[in-house]
Amino acid sequence: MENKNSVFKITKNLTVTCFIAGIIIAVVYYITAPVAAQKQIELKNKTMQTLVKNADDFKSVNGKTDWYEAKQGSNTVAYVVPAESKGYGGAITMLVAVTPDGKVIGFSIVSHNETPGLGANASKDSFTAQFKGKTADDLLVVKDKSNNKNIQAMTGATITSRAVTKGVKEAVQEVTTFTGGK
């Protein structure tokens, strides 16, 4: 009889402990979720401002999810659009800034699972700077060091180089289609 009572007590204690832990987790989530969402918005705004330095305002583009029109006064200077491509370690998500006439201003990698020291170098200036001013036709990965027209693959990270370039190229093509290349 004592063993059953002991098992019952243990079960009751575990149930109460799990219930209390669940309440604590729910309260912490309730408090931190809005703060985390606000921080995410601030990070996105800071990233957009870094990509399009001469913009003084960013407006959502009607009919386009997560697209932003970068404005300088009343002029549209760029579009900041999301892009995603499959790299060596999985999905690479980016924000890409493109001029209305289809030239890359820059991009920022938001998340990736690429190999540290190789594919993770895709966010370094030595790689990202190659994209500035390029049109969709120029966004091709090459391994010829004398070719300055296209994108030089990162040593040991050709798959990542191609994935990032593909994502940026698709973003440029989407913006060009949206604006009619103007």
Image (spheres, helix red, strand yellow):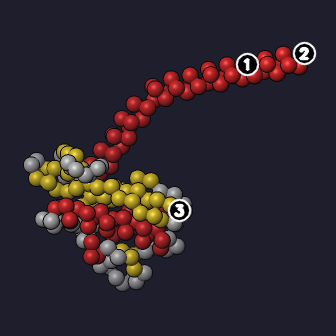
Of the two numbered discs 2 and 3 in the rendering, the one whose residue sits closer to the viewer: 2
Asked if labels 3 and 2 touch by Cβ distance under 8 angstroms, the answer is no
Quadrant that contains the N terminus: top right
- Is 132 placed left or right of 18 in the picture? left
Q: Out of 172 and 45, give the one closest to the viewer.
A: 172
Of callouts 2 and 1, which one flags the residue occurring earlier in the amino acid sequence?
2
Residue 72 in the image: state x and y as whole percent.
14, 50
- Is 22 placed left or right of 179 in the picture? right
Snapshot quadrant of residue 38: top left
Of the two numbered discs 3 and 1 in the rendering, the one whose residue sits closer to the viewer: 1
Task: Name which residue lies at 33% across and 40% down.
Answer: 42
Relative to 158, residue 52 above or below: above
Q: Which residue is mark 1?
A: 12
Q: Which residue is mark 2?
A: 1
Q: CA distance from mark 3 to mark 1?
A: 45 Å
Mark 1 residue crowding within 10 angstroms, few (<14) / some (14–19) / many (20+):
few
Q: Which residue is mark 3?
A: 89
Would residue 56 be seen by someone viewing this image from the given angle? Answer: yes
Mark 2 residue crowding within 10 angstroms, few (<14) / some (14–19) / many (20+):
few
Relative to 8, residue 41 above or below: below
Q: Out of 159 and 14, give the one closest to the viewer.
A: 14
Of the two numbered discs 2 and 1 in the rendering, the one whose residue sits closer to the viewer: 2
Task: Name which residue lies at 9% across and 49% down.
Answer: 74
Q: Out of 9 and 1, give the one closest to the viewer.
A: 1
Q: Amino acid at mark 3?
A: Gly
Q: CA distance from mark 2 to mark 3?
A: 57 Å
- Is 169 placed left or right of 91 in the picture? left
**Local secondary structure at mark 3:** loop
